[in-house]
Amino acid sequence: MYSMEELKTWWEVPAIAHFFSLFKSCFSLTDFTIEELEECLLTDGEDDKSTIFTSRLLTQLLQGCYSNPNISVTTYHDTLLHIMKKRWEEEDGRVNPLSSANADFHSLPTMLKVQIIHRLTEYRLDANVSVFVLVLC
């Protein structure tokens, strides 16, 4: 289990908060403080409020990655598995922590959840850039 002091040293946490703050209007993202994010990351999987919060972040990022507003907090899991297989594992060459049948995002170590959410913000930007490039061509 990580402490709040450890979590505050991870550069990805403010990067995630900044992404959501910067793009909240144009991507219709949740508005939150970095303190709310930090608290929810530490208690995700143990506290219903935190689990719902992180599920909402994942859902919003995945909706944008796939241009699919039908992805919801109750259905995002399969989409998360898909993007982790295609982007995280095959493109990025990382070990996929969600590849086993019993794997659940909310049971992963906090650092790994932070890394996944951060990478999803990058995938989300990639999706928007791809659409922009197609429009220009």
Image (cartoon, rainbow, N blue to C red):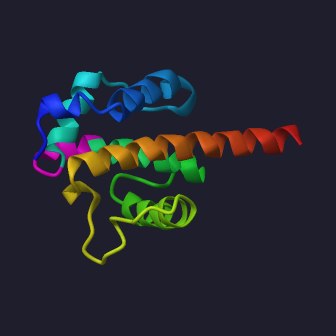
Task: Tell whether 54 sits left or right of 44.
Answer: right
Q: Provide residue 72's location: percent of width, then percent of height.
A: 40, 53
**Which image quadrant is residue 31 in?**
top left
- Residue found 62% across the figure and 44% down from its top: 126
Is 99 located above or below residue 84 in the figure?
Answer: below
Residue at 42% over, 66% down: 81
- In-front residue for pair 3/37: 3
129 with respect to 47 (left or right): right
42 lies left or right of 86: left
Which segment did they paint magenta?
A: 45-53
Locate residue 105, reporting x and y percent: 28, 58
Q: Residue furthest right?
A: 137
51 inside magenta stretch: yes
User: Residue at position x 21%, y 53% from top?
Assistant: 109
Quadrant (top left, top right, bottom left, bottom right) of the C terminus: top right
Q: Quadrant of residue 29?
A: top left
Q: Nearer the viewer, residue 51 or 104?
A: 104
